Image: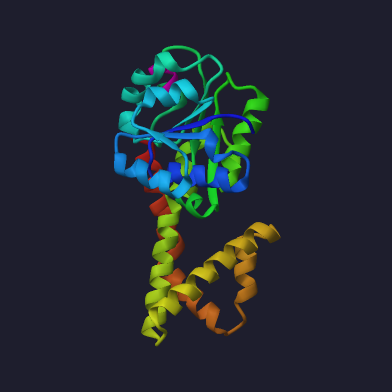
């Protein structure tokens, strides 16, 4: 893809996205530029990825064909006000912020723009991200496919309706934190049973990875896969019964409900 990709904001997510684009071979490092007010963050990006960096957001807007707004939601209006005059009619804007809608961003620009709102998650750091893509009606199908290709360099991508964004945040955007808590708890239990902590986390994390892969690759209902592990009178059903007794599933559902509610109220 012979496009210039510009990132405004040099945080972990932007770095992960750019790293995926480069390692996939889709985008050359010479065709990526980052801006940020934090020069230390820019030095880290330059050292790790070898891309061009600048403290000037307008330089990114002038140079890039696709501009990824990788700043905090509360900075969107300020950044857009700064770069608005430099955004060309055929420039594509990609948003990765929670709580900033397509309509919000279009209003900040005050004119028609080509815009894709996205919601990636932190496993993008290891190229196993899950990204929701919500294009506005100014993007052509070819441009949407191009954006999907970019986002696909660091994980999976699905187009969703923007009205589902709060569900996406609960199910995918925030959920790595729940899984990390599960792995931590499994590791603690392993230590309690005599395993070394590093080994306990390794076994737990690989079990979670393998279980997730089974869901994705078999297409079977998770409940059916769970039943396959539960032999009559065996160890697993004993553990499952205790989890049900303690409200495991209802606790997860309630946590995700409040997560979605928080997203709606941002």
From the top left corner, tell me how far across and down residue 13 is, in percent.
Answer: 43, 44
Answer yes or no: is residue 121 visible.
no
Answer yes or no: is residue 67 visible.
yes
- 125 to 137, vertically: above or below: below
- 167 to 191, vertically: above or below: above
Q: Is residue 121 magenta?
A: no
Residue sitting at x 60%, y 69%: 226
**Horizontal side of residue 211 vs 179, given as left or right:** right
Residue sitting at x 34%, y 34%: 36
Assign the magenta stretch its main secondary structure: helix
Residue farthest to the bottom, as pictured: 194
Between 200 and 39, the residue placed more toward the observer is 39
From the top left corner, tell me how far across and down residue 183 is, in percent.
Answer: 43, 68
Locate the C terminus by quadrant. Answer: top left
Residue sitting at x 55%, y 47%: 20
Between 235 and 215, the residue placed more toward the observer is 215
Locate the N terminus by quadrant. Answer: top right
Label count reads 0
Between 31 and 193, the residue placed more toward the observer is 31
Residue farthest to the right, as pictured: 218
- 2 to 168, vertically: above or below: above
**Horizontal side of residue 11 vs 224, given as left or right:** left
Residue span colored magenta: 105-109
Q: How is the image coloured?
A: rainbow
From the top left corner, tell me how far across and down residue 146 is, in percent.
Answer: 63, 32
From the top left corner, tell me how far across and down residue 236 is, in percent.
Answer: 54, 79
């Amino acid at each position: 893809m012979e496009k210039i990709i510009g990132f405004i904001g040099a945080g972990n997510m932007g770095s992960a996205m750019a790293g995926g684009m480069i390692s996939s071979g889709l985008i050359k490092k010479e065709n990526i530029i980052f801006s940020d007010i934090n020069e230390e963050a820019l030095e880290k990006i330059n050292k790790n990825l070898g891309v061009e960096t600048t403290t000037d957001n307008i330089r990114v807007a002038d140079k890039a064909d696709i501009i990824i707004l990788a700043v905090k939601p509360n900075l969107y209006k300020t950044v857009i006000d700064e770069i608005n005059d430099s955004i060309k009619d055929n420039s594509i804007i990609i948003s990765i912020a929670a709580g900033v809608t397509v309509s919000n961003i279009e209003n900040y620009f005050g004119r028609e723009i080509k815009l894709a709102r996205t919601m990636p998650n932190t496993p993008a750091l290891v190229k196993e991200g899950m990204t929701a893509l919500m294009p506005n009606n100014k993007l052509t199908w070819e441009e949407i496919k191009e954006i999907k290709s970019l986002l696909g360099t660091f994980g999976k991508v699905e187009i969703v309706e923007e009205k589902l964004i709060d569900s996406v945040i609960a199910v995918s955007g925030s959920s790595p934190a729940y899984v990390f808590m599960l792995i931590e708890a499994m590791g603690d239990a392993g230590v309690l049973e005599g395993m070394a902590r590093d080994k306990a986390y390794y076994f737990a994390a690989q079990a979670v990875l393998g279980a997730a892969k089974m869901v994705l690759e078999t297409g079977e209902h998770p409940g059916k896969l769970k039943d396959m592990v539960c032999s009559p009178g065996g160890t697993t059903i004993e553990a499952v019964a205790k989890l049900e007794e303690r409200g495991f599933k209802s606790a997860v559902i309630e946590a995700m409900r409040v997560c979605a509610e928080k997203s709606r109220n941002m």
